[in-house]
Structures are given as C-alpha cells and as structure tokens.
Image (spheres, rainbow, N blue to C red):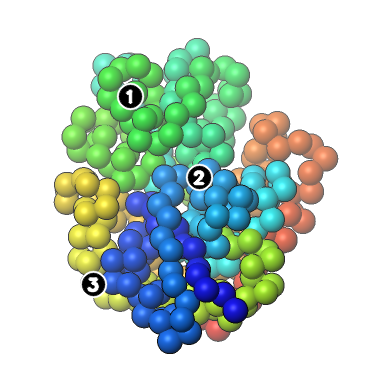
Amino acid sequence: MLKEIRVDFATYNPLSLIIREQKLLEKEFEKDGIAIRWVQTLGSNKALEFLNAGSIDFGSTAGAAALLAKINGNPIQSVSVFSRPEWTALVTRKDKGITKVSDLKGKAVAVTRGTDPHIFLIRALAEAGLKEKDVKLVLLQHPDGRTALARGDVDAWAGLDPLMAAAEVEEGAILFHRKPENNTWGVLNVPTEFAAKNPEIVTRVIDVYERARQAAVKDIKPVSAALVAVARLPEAVIAKQIERTDLSTSVIGKVQSDAILAAGVALQEAEVIKSDVDVKKIVEALIEPKFTAKLKA
C-alpha cells in the first residue's frame, strides 16, 4: 500500500496551487493514511526530469514537452488536462527593434530547452523560414530568461506566464509574436508503471483536480490569490495570466492528441525530432483518456 503520493505544484498550473493551499489532496487521502508530498517545479523540463527520476508521481507539463520526453524514453502517460493556456509568446524590449520573428536572425534568444516556450520558438522560426541555428540560443531557466531580457543581455525571450505577464506589466516588455493555437495544453502526467499499479489513486487525484477546476470556474479569486502568494507577483500581473488561461475542461482525448501531434510534426519538419520517429504512435501511447472518460468535456 502506498504511504505517500508525491505531487508537483507550479505557477504555470494554477489549479495545483489552490489544491495545495486548501489541502484538498491531504483531505482526500487522510482516511487511507496516505501522506501528500508537494514538490515545486519551475518548468515542464523540471517536472519531466523529476518524473523520469522517480521523485514525483504527478507532474504538470505542456503537452508537447511531454511528447518530446516520451520520444526520449521518459516512461510517462498524460492522464488529464489542467488548463488550456496561452502561456507562451516571443517577448522583446522596446529598444531592441524586433517586431517580427524574422528579425531574430543572428540575435540572442533566452529559452528553456524542452519546454512549451522552446517548442513554440522552434515552430515560430520554422514558419519564418529560420532554424534554431540561425539564432543564438541562451539556455536559461524561465525566471533567468526574464531577468536576462530585462537587463538587455538577450534580444528576445521565449516567455512563460506568469513571468511573461510580469515582464509586460513591470518592464514594458512586448509580446511581438503570439499564436495561441501553438501553445499546447497543460497536462498532468504520471509514470506509466505508477498508473498501472495505482489506477484508483490516479482517478482520485484527477477527481480532486476536477472539483478544484469546477470551483475555480465559479470563482477565480482564490486561484488568483494563491498565484499572487506563490509567484510573489502583483495582482495586475496575475490577472493577465488568468485571462490567458482557459479552465473549461479536465478531459484529455482527441483534441489534445491532435494539438500535440501538430507540434510533433512541426518539430520533425524542423529536424528537432528525427525523421524515423513515428510521432503519431508515440502521441497515442502518451495520451491515456480512460481516467477522465467519465468527466464531461
């Protein structure tokens, strides 16, 4: 019998913050004598690293980031949706003279490898006829990317909310390339072995997420307050993030598969994913719809 469930919380997953703050998982599993351990993740790359290392059981990531990890041998399944966000865009400063993606040629761009902002950047470059090698990638964690742009150390940043919203509000940063449909869904992932051994646990964690989602749809204020507290950012910044976050479903299935597959195909065309990889087959192995099948889409 499990003694502990290890769950991540992240500022890019607002529901995780309210679940943690209100001890909803602790209450759910108290009668079973199962403890909850919370681990903060700063980006999809960190959540995936922790999942691969076996140090967390539930990790929040972007769908496309989960796909890349699965291709690279990370044994995970995406079991539910926590949001449909527009959490990434390409960001610059007013004094850099960058207004479109093609302006990035030869420029320094801060990015966190293996995350949705990284994938978003690759797709944006490809659509502008550029490859990764045409820009100077500066590999930094998301908070350091924001700082590097604010200091002028880089010309652009593949941003992530709420840090991106903070850069807009506090530093006058400009979102010069937005494409909401190229943001992949926020998905909750579990190791495949954990899901096989503990299907009831997975279902109950998702049920807690679903209750938190329904409460947030009715009243977003507690979620905003939890974000303000954890991200240590002003309400005006968090309001921007919240308005870019759609919490209308927990259900994972064809819609998410299609979005993640489109990202995978784009990455294959950009030669980030090898040509011999069967992206469709791996997406099918990644998305596990059975745990949310009973929820309303």
Crowd tier of the residue under label 2, counting other residues whose Cα lies within 10 Å: few below 14, some 14–19, many 20 or above? some
State if disc 2 and disc 3 touch (CB < 8 Å). Answer: no
- Residue 227 appears in the rendering: yes
State if disc 2 and disc 1 touch (CB < 8 Å). Answer: no
Q: Secondary structure at mark 3?
A: loop
- Residue 180 appears in the rendering: no
* Earlier-in-chain disc, 1 versus 3: 1
Residue 146, picture quadrant? top left
Question: Of 93 and 70, which appears nearest the observer?
Answer: 70
Q: Quadrant of the N terminus?
A: bottom right
Question: Looking at the image, which residue is at 25% across and 60% down?
Answer: 226
Seen in the picture, residue 109 relative to 240 is either above or below; the reply is above
Crowd tier of the residue under label 3, counting other residues whose Cα lies within 10 Å: few below 14, some 14–19, many 20 or above? few
Distance Cα–Cα, label 3 vs label 2? 30 Å
Q: Secondary structure at mark 1?
A: helix
Q: Secondary structure at mark 2?
A: helix
Instruction: Count numbered badges in the picture.
Output: 3
Name the residue that disc number 1 marks. 149
Closer to the eye: label 3 or 2: 2
Distance Cα–Cα, label 1 vs label 2? 22 Å
Distance Cα–Cα, label 1 vs label 3? 34 Å
Name the residue that disc number 3 marks. 219
Question: Looking at the image, which residue is at 65% across and 58% down?
Answer: 76
Crowd tier of the residue under label 1, counting other residues whose Cα lies within 10 Å: few below 14, some 14–19, many 20 or above? many
Name the residue that disc number 2 marks. 46
Left or right of 172? Residue 70 is: right
